[in-house]
Image (cartoon, helix red, strand yellow):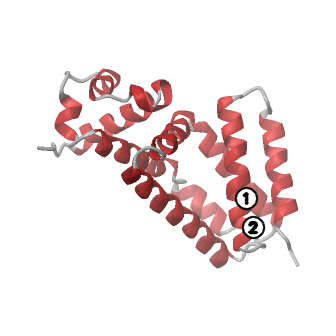
């Protein structure tokens, strides 16, 4: 029977994210989560029905924590609608995702694990598809230049840039990263 203390559950899921990032999917056990969360042995198994449940909730929590705050959303809604604003939005996004290193690394682990777990693959496919669709819809409503294809191409290009930065941090400096994001927007987003 799964427990209902939402604060404890969130702490356990956050601990699971840290375990995924540090130990990989194979290292994600209820015991490892208990240790990372500094709770008594057996606590995680009281909150999650099985390991798949824990994996799924960890993935959902990463997306939750990656959402921009209200001030960022308001700032982008009131900004001008040109390519420079688009580039600024993408630089902020890459910076925000990069600053949650363990979350993104946990997502990479989940994606690899999803190649072996059809149920997890289905959930991640649904979540990523919804995320891409929401980004396309936001873009189309925002009045920013470019089209749905540009949004998808930036999604793909910037995800790999983030992977490079988080797994091999010496490849690009933060300044180079920002310049690459700007160049990607300038080259992918047409203004005609």
Left or right, 99 with reference to 144? left
In this rendering, is residue 173 above or below 4? above
Left or right, 176 with reference to 109? right
Residue 93: which numbered mark, if any?
A: none
Residue 154: which numbered mark, if any?
A: 1
In this rendering, is residue 143 above or below 21? below
Badge 2 element: helix
Badge 1 element: helix
In this rendering, is residue 188 above or below 97? below
Quarter of the image that includes the C terminus: bottom right
Tell me which residue sits at (68%, 64%) in the image: 152
Tell me which residue sits at (79%, 50%) in the image: 181
Q: CA distance from mark 1 to mark 2?
A: 6 Å
The answer to whether residue 49 shows anywhere in this view is yes
Residue 150: which numbered mark, if any?
A: 2
Quarter of the image that includes the N terminus: top left
Q: Nearer the viewer, residue 79 or 173?
A: 173
Tell me which residue sits at (17%, 46%) in the image: 4
Residue 174 place in picture, x, y as percent: 77, 36
Residue 94 place in picture, x, y as percent: 67, 47
The answer to whether residue 91 shows anywhere in this view is no
- The total of numbered circles placed on residues is 2
Q: In which quarter of the view is residue 108 placed? A: top right
Q: Does the CB distance between marks 1 and 2 fall below 8 Å?
A: yes
Tell me which residue sits at (26%, 40%) in the image: 9
Q: Nearer the viewer, residue 89 or 180?
A: 180
Residue 122 place in picture, x, y as percent: 42, 58
Crowdedness near tag 1: few (<14), some (14–19) or many (≥20) residues, C-alpha within 10 Å? some
Residue 13 place in picture, x, y as percent: 34, 38
Crowdedness near tag 2: few (<14), some (14–19) or many (≥20) residues, C-alpha within 10 Å? some
Q: In which quarter of the view is residue 47 placed? A: top left
């Amino acid at each position: 029977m799964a427990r209902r203390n939402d604060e404890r559950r969130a702490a356990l899921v956050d601990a699971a994210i840290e375990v995924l990032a540090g130990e990989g999917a194979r290292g994600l056990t209820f015991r490892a989560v208990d240790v990372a969360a500094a709770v008594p042995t057996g606590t995680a198994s009281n909150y999650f029905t099985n390991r798949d449940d824990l994996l799924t909730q960890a993935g959902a929590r990463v997306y939750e924590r990656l959402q921009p705050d209200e001030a960022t959303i308001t700032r982008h809604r009131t900004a001008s609608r040109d390519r420079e604003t688009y580039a600024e939005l993408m630089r902020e996004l890459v910076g925000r995702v990069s600053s949650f290193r363990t979350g993104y690394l946990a997502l990479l682990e989940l994606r690899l694990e999803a190649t072996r777990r059809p149920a997890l693959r289905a959930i991640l496919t649904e979540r990523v598809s919804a995320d891409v669709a929401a980004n396309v819809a936001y873009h189309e409503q925002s009045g920013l230049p470019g089209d749905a294809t540009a949004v998808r191409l930036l999604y793909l290009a910037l995800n790999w840039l983030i992977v490079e930065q988080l797994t091999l941090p010496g490849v690009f400096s933060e300044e180079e990263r920002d310049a690459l994001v700007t160049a990607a927007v300038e080259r992918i987003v047409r203004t005609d």
